[in-house]
Amino acid sequence: MSFAPAQRSLFARLPAFVPANPSCTAPVQRQMHSLATPALSCAKTTSGRPRKMMKMAASETMQSKRSFVTPNGPQFAVALPEPNRQQPSISNPIPQPQSSISLPRGSGPEPQYDRIVSGYSVFHSPQPFHLVHGGVLPEFDIAYETWGHLNADRSNAILLHTGLSASSHAKSHDRNRNPGWWEKFIGPGMPLDTNKFFVICTNVIGGCYGSTGPSSMNPATGRRYGSDFPIVTVHDIIRAQLRLLDYLGIEKLHASVGSSMGGMQSLCLAADAPHRVSRLISISACARSHPYSIAVRHTQRQVLMADPNYANGHYYEGTPPHVGMKLAREIATITYRSGPEWEKRFGRKRANPAAPVGLCPDFLVETYLDHQGERFCLTYDANSLLYISKAMDLFDMSHPPPVDPNKGGLALRAASGLPPPATSGFQCEEPSPEVFAASLNEETDPVRDTDRLVQGLKTIRHPVLVLGVQSDILFPVWQQREVAECLRKGGNKNVTYYELDSIFGHDTFLIELQSVGGAVKGHLENRIGFD
């Protein structure tokens, strides 16, 4: 495995690139009195209360690790300090096993990101699974959970698609009573009414909550895939989910429902397999990823991979890239909410107005980002974040669609004369100056691009609900309008478009039960168009 020159130079500058005092290493650094300066001495947490220092008895072993385990899945080991050894440096930080930060009451609703440790079922596909951009999974698992009951003719199933980092645990149930990420939207009488529908939610392939992903064991090598995992697309995710539906004996879904990346999946399923679904809902998504969101996710990946502990994606036997994950999540969180909400919620308030001003998290908005990044670090696999975010970047429903390599696509690709596909995440090749210049100088053609998108969405003739949020900066409302308008131009006469006025930005779909839930319930239960 090798890095392009630009990547190598980035790693060479790592000590200067990593923040001088990442707050997630503050407990360790506060023990390093020689590094403390007035501006960098963070004596308290972002909530103004002292952090608990890591304590280890002298009789303990020289190296202690805590592992976070998922059923049938990998352990995420977190190294703790070694007694009587030199403390870690800033360029090699040791993460905290758990954040002690707590935000003040009334600080606003937050989505759930808790690690799922039980309660899901696993579908195992023993057949090889070829992916769009090359590579093959010899076999794969999909973790899934269900609510409600499948009717006699198996026509009342709803497939609920997840966003980037969500698990299959959308709703609590007897096998896992923890609240799910869409807890208030699923249940008797709720928008996804379990008295009427059989709701299925999966963890996508490439994820880390029970489905096959980079942290899974590679049966060919006996080691975890790491960055040797093949590149995944939304089309691959859908094709894997269709195998699950085949296993469950569901020929046609009542609906495909999703928000954010889940909305991408909903559109993709209806376009790729129109005979497998009756209607669909896309919330705060897009029909193709645009440069702004690609740039944001690219920056997150670069920050994560710049953490020395990332170790080219093979960190599972050592210390995970805690600092990189934390910073990547902070960048992402900025795009999930909105400026008007933060103005109202935080303003310019400091967490502790009486404390001396330093370079540590000080303003309430800083402590909020610090808290969001910290609690995400040990609940999601770094490689999964890289791979799934890249799948979002690659998403484009324009014509022509990618061929399915599991249905003769490999032969079609070979006959086309295209270069060999990449088979791992780090098979990177820098373009020549001539190729780069030609690509840069090629003019964009909005009319041509829109025509291709209309053509790519033409197979979707189902009743469609598209929801956008005016304060969403990650998937702005103009992208939701683009979905609706292209569907209508392609001949779909059953497109409903709503634009919501909410201050919660992209996360509105997790929070606004009345507006989002009401629209979803109406679309699922009304007799519209045709089934």
Image (tube, helix red, strand yellow):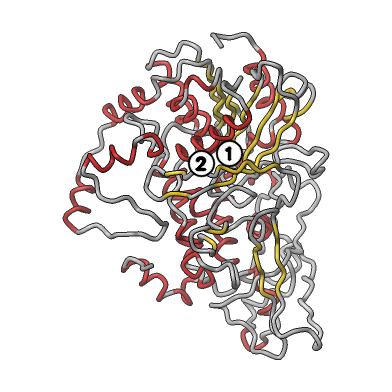
Looking at the image, is 457 positioned above or below residue 106? above
Looking at the image, is 105 positioned above or below residue 163? below
User: Left or right: 294 with respect to 308?
Assistant: left
Query: What type is the residue that disc 1 sits on?
Result: His
Question: Which numbered tag is attached to residue 134?
Answer: none
The picture places residue 288, in percent across and down from the top left corner, at 41, 35
Q: Pointers 2 and 1 in contact (CB under 8 A)? A: yes
The picture places residue 318, in percent across and down from the top left corner, at 59, 73
Residue at x 64%, y 89% (from the top left corner): 86
Query: What type is the residue that disc 2 sits on?
Result: Leu
The picture places residue 206, in percent across and down from the top left corner, at 53, 49
Q: Nearer the viewer, residue 229 or 489?
A: 229
The picture places residue 425, in percent across and down from the top left corner, at 42, 57
Looking at the image, is 197 positioned above or below residue 309? above
Residue at x 57%, y 56% (from the top left corner): 216
Which secondary structure, mark 2?
A: loop
User: Left or right: 64 with respect to 216?
Assistant: right
- The residue under label 1 is 506
Question: Which numbered tag is attached to residue 474?
Answer: 2
Which secondary structure, mark 1?
A: helix
Q: Quadrant of residue 3?
A: bottom left
